[in-house]
Image: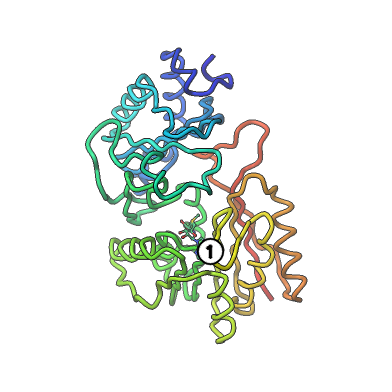
Amino acid sequence: MAGTGTHVRGAVRQPDALRELLRLAVERRAPLATDPATTIYRLVNAAADGLPGLTVDRYGDALVASLYDDDDRLPPRPMPEPLIALLAETAETIGARALYVKYRPKEAGRIAEDQVEMLAPPKPVWGPDLGEFVAVEAGLAYLIRPGEGLSVGLFGDMREGRARVRAWADGRRVLNCFAYTCGFGVAAAAGGAIRVLNLDLSKPALAWGQKNYRANGFEPDPYDFVYGDVFDWLARLAKRGDRFELVILDPPGFSRTRRRRFSAARDYGELAVLAAGCTAADGLLLACCNVAELPWPRFRDQVLAGLAGVGRAAEVAGVYHEPAVDFPAPAGTEPYLKMLLLRLG
Ligand SMILES: C[S@@+](CC[C@H](N)C(=O)[O-])C[C@H]1O[C@@H](n2cnc3c(N)ncnc32)[C@H](O)[C@@H]1O
């Protein structure tokens, strides 16, 4: 029965129950929906909202639904029509105009380029194609491209992380590693950072980041959007004596470059040591990790052991997770997003 652990594909057989679960999910987000300064948030969080296999994110006028299937079959089974109809109904209730769908195979890290269009159809399944548009978070503008790949421009679960970075940034030099579209960079610039250096291995993501700066009235300095491998750059910056009062690490769970394979579960300690080499004395290091399989104590211990191993004093100044209002953890599970704020000696 819908809401008792049945995958959403099966739950469509009970449209009334499914409609009610969607209504409850929307109601739960009411505190966010009433804030016009934030139009980016999660509307449905899978099992935690009684809808295993389905997440729905709101980006202003667009809903982006993700279907998680147990099989990895390609092309993926399309979203069932009754579910599209119910989500369209939900969109209309909250004033959204389009619905996009993403299919999430279990091994998301192994997706080949030519599979992306199959998993992330560029056109909406309902409503007009919105192309690129602006959605807001805490009054800051972010360019969203709901039809461009599996990631559409901003990860909503990091909302409070960005708010904290904005609050800490004043008067600090900030290093934003694994910057993607520079969400942390925009937040730090808005918070009064003296300088923000954004590092990423994707030129299109950094170009998108520059557009995000402009959308907020900040003129991007091209020297502050650096293309390259974070591991190489951290070593380079440390060697040439560049120091930052706030260093942000927000890597993917896995990353493979021509020269290196990174797994957060295995290598985070090493990454933290490299980052510490660029962190000023008394500076802050924010280490983030979204790997659900890496339990919080192991993540913390790995980072602290790495720093202790190189004799760098580290005081835990804060521990944060994804926002519970729109990313509630399913019963019996821990939050998956871990943010460890360290003050380094
Ligand atoms: C999960 S996203 C990071 C999210 C981002 N911090 C944010 O606030 O939205 C992963 C990003 O890491 C980048 N990346 C992966 N491996 C990298 C590496 N070795 N060096 C630099 N960037 C890397 C990818 O290009 C991608 O933009």
Work out whether residue 23 or residue 78 is closer to the camera in this orientation and state it.
78
- Rendered location of residue 253, percent (x, y): 58, 53
- SS for tag 1? loop
Residue drawn at point x = 60 percent, y = 55 percent:
339
Say if disc 1 is inside 8 Å of ligand 1.
Answer: yes
Residue drawn at point x = 40 percent, y = 59 percent:
181
Q: Is residue 96 toward the left or the right of residue 202 in the image? A: left
Work out whether residue 241 or residue 67 is closer to the camera in this orientation and state it.
67
**Res. 71 visible in picture:** yes
**Res. 29 visible in picture:** no
Q: Quadrant of residue 61?
A: top left
- Rendered location of residue 155, percent (x, y): 45, 50
Work out whether residue 277 or residue 123 is closer to the camera in this orientation and state it.
123
Work out whether residue 118 or residue 201 is closer to the camera in this orientation and state it.
118
Q: Is residue 57 toward the left or the right of residue 276 in the image? A: left
Which residue is identified by label 1?
Answer: 257
Query: Is 308 above or below relative to 135?
Result: below
Query: Is 60 above or below relative to 74?
Result: below
Q: Amino acid at mark 1?
A: Thr
